[in-house]
Amino acid sequence: MKSIKIIISLLMLSIITISNAQKEKPNSEARQFIENAEITQINKDWNVKAEFRSGLGEVVSFFPVEAIDLKSNKKVKSLQMDMTAAYQSAGRSGNYFKSSWIDLNEVEEFIVFIEQYVIPNLKDKTETNQSVTYIFNSREITFSFYIGKSSRRISIYLKDNGSTDNEHYFWTESQVSKIPELLTMLKEVK
């Protein structure tokens, strides 16, 4: 009887572990490539860049990169996003910096999202007490475009293994007009 309880307990633990592992989404192929290479070279093209700034001095930059595993000479191209965001937590404040990657197949979807849902609605407004939000999810970022009665805003959240970091994010209302520049840059990457 005791061995049956142990077997059932192990079986339940295995099911829970497998279930949780399946919920976890992998990071981008670019991040996995960089993390698995012993020696990596990353070439950044700063000539092709889109950048958003907030009134707090926060910055988000998008630019194409090529990562090279120097041992195998394998290469991966992707879009890198660097974010410097202000944070305040538990009485501490400062700047948070992180790089995230958007795989090329996700860049295609990002272009479609901006062309079909964001650009046509850049000047839209809603009625009082109403809003509309368009959201693009890649493996490592969430890009949100919010429309209200008197404002429009972009927000960018980072993800690790599918979990969204709600403490470190970027948002701006004043830079919404620069979204067409992001679209132009994305089209140069593909």
Image (cartoon, rainbow, N blue to C red):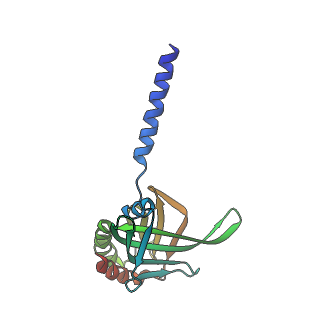
Residue at the outermost front position:
71
Seen from the viewer's position, the closer of residues 69 and 86 is 69
Residue 51, percent across and down?
A: 45, 81
The structure residue drawn at horizontal position 38% and vertical position 70%, both measured from the top left corner, is: 68
- Total of numbered circles in the picture? 0
Compared across the picture, whether 58 is left or right of 178 comes to right
Up/down of 68 relative to 2, above or below = below
Q: Is residue 56 left or right of residue 72?
A: right
Percent x, y of residue 91: 71, 65
Q: Position of residue 30 (x, y in %)?
A: 38, 65
Q: Nearer the viewer, residue 73 or 76?
A: 73
Towards the viewer: 30 or 75: 75
Instruction: Establish if 109 lies above or below 178.
Output: above
Residue 185 seen from this side? yes
Residue 130 seen: no
The C terminus lies in which quarter of the figure? bottom left
Image coordinates for residue 162, horizontal then vertical, percent: 44, 55
Instruction: Give the farthest residue toward the right.
Output: 91
In this view, which residue lies farthest toward the top? 1
User: Measuring 39% from the left and 68% from the top, which residue is drawn there?
Assistant: 70
Q: In terms of image quadrants, where is residue 19?
A: top left
